[in-house]
């Protein structure tokens, strides 16, 4: 793996990354560990806000003996018109990898093409692969072997949904996505997820009815209805997504042992109710924590030149 622009980039190394993430979780802060990324630096360009991604990557680099630089796009010459390609070429002379949270997936691809160092997609309009790698770890912690289990995704067919479809297909989970008309996941990603799932005897389907998607599900996953950059659509979205709220009534149709996931930040009372988010089925805090452990494994893969 040279870059992590899509979940599919990690397909071959996925098992190793998840196993190494488990070892990092057991070792916690790295007591007794070597510092495999001593002297290495990760530049992190953010075009949008972040709590979890920024902090987990920054802390992860510190645990591994390296350093991370937070770069707000507006503070770079990029914000005044320097090209992405020139920025990538220069950063490659200073740092060992670049994380980029962008509006446009095409911009992440352009940066990666011009950079001589690995690029990690820190979320764009198409995917959120670092989130989903750690979510696959969280699902395993909760369910054990995920093969043949069912995940229901409710709400917007957005970046998180797209990456989740690919991640579940790679780990042979069945996925039912319920979205309103016009908010389906990306058609190209859906087709790729369907092909990948079929190779592992799993399936993917997109339906309208949230109760149909949730029926018998082992994991119920939702995300915000208004992603960053879509704020002007807030009113319309809050109307159309209302039937897709994860609440006790909807969850009652899932497997009685079902667990609930959300990448956070959550909009309490919109896509998910307080009693679900704060209740016994919720995995959201483990989900947030596991970003740190799994991304440390990812960083060692990409920057350490070998085994995690
Ligand atoms: N889930 C996630 O990526 O959160 P942040 O936007 O806070 O980084
Ligand atoms: N879909 C959300 C995820 C935030 C982590 C967004 O893009 O804003």
Image (cartoon, grey):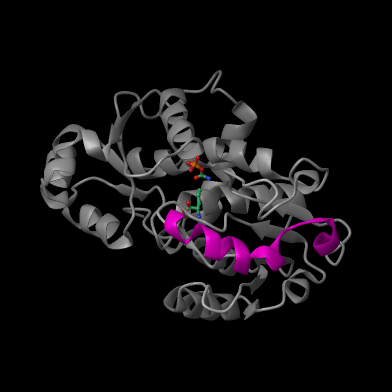
**Residue at the location (64% across, 57% down)?**
222
The answer to whether 307 appears left or right of 255 in the picture is left
Position of residue 63 measured from the top left corner of the image (x, y, whole percent)? 46, 24
Position of residue 124 measured from the top left corner of the image (x, y, whole percent)? 38, 55
Residue 246 drawn above or below residue 52: below
Residue 146 in sight: no
Q: Main secondary structure of the magenta part?
A: helix
- Snapshot quadrant of residue 211: bottom right
Residue 67 in sight: yes
Q: Tell me where the magenta segment starts and ends, as one range.
A: 231-251
Which quadrant: the N terminus?
bottom left
In depth, the one of 265 and 32 nearer the eye is 265
Q: Residue furthest toward the front?
A: 235
- Snapshot quadrant of residue 77: top left
Position of residue 95 measured from the top left corner of the image (x, y, whole percent)? 23, 34
The answer to whether 186 appears left or right of 277 in the picture is left
Is residue 235 covered in magenta? yes
In depth, the one of 274 and 4 nearer the eye is 274
Residue 147 drawn above or below residue 114: below
The answer to whether 86 appears left or right of 281 in the picture is left
Position of residue 27 measured from the top left corner of the image (x, y, whole percent)? 60, 27
**Residue at the location (50% across, 62% down)?**
163
**Residue at the location (27% across, 62% down)?**
106
Residue 40 drawn above or below residue 47: above
Is residue 155 covered in magenta? no
**Residue at the location (44% across, 51% down)?**
228
- Snapshot quadrant of residue 257: bottom right
In depth, the one of 47 and 32 nearer the eye is 47
In depth, the one of 156 and 305 nearer the eye is 156
């Amino acid at each position: 793996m040279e870059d992590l622009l899509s979940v599919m980039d990690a397909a071959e190394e996925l098992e190793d990354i998840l196993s190494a993430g488990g070892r990092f979780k057991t070792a916690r802060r790295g007591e007794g560990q070597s510092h495999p990324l001593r002297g290495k630096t990760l530049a992190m360009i953010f075009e949008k806000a972040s709590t979890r991604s920024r902090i987990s990557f920054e802390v992860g680099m510190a645990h591994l003996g390296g350093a991370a630089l937070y770069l707000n796009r507006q503070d770079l010459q990029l914000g005044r018109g320097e090209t992405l390609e020139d920025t990538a070429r220069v950063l490659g002379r200073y740092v060992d990898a670049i994380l980029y949270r962008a509006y446009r997936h095409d911009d992440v691809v352009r940066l990666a093409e011009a950079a001589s160092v690995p690029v990690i997609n820190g979320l764009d309009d198409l995917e959120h692969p670092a989130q989903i790698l750690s979510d696959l770890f969280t699902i395993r912690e909760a369910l054990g072997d995920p093969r043949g289990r069912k995940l229901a995704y409710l709400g917007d067919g957005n970046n998180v949904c797209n990456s989740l479809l690919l991640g579940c297909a790679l780990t042979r989970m069945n996925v039912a996505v319920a979205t309103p008309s016009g908010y389906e996941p990306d058609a190209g990603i859906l087709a790729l997820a369907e092909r990948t799932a079929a190779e592992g005897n799993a399936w993917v389907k997109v339906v309208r009815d949230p109760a149909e998607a949730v029926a018998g599900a082992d994991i119920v996953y939702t995300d915000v209805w208004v992603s960053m950059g879509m704020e002007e659509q807030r009113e319309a979205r809050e109307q159309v997504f209302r039937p897709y709220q994860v609440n006790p009534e909807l969850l009652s149709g899932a497997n009685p042992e079902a667990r609930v996931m959300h990448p956070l930040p959550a909009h309490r009372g919109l896509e998910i109710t307080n009693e679900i988010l704060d209740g016994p089925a919720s995995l959201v805090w483990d989900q947030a924590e596991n970003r740190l452990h799994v991304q440390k494994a990812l960083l060692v893969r990409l920057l350490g030149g070998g085994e995690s």
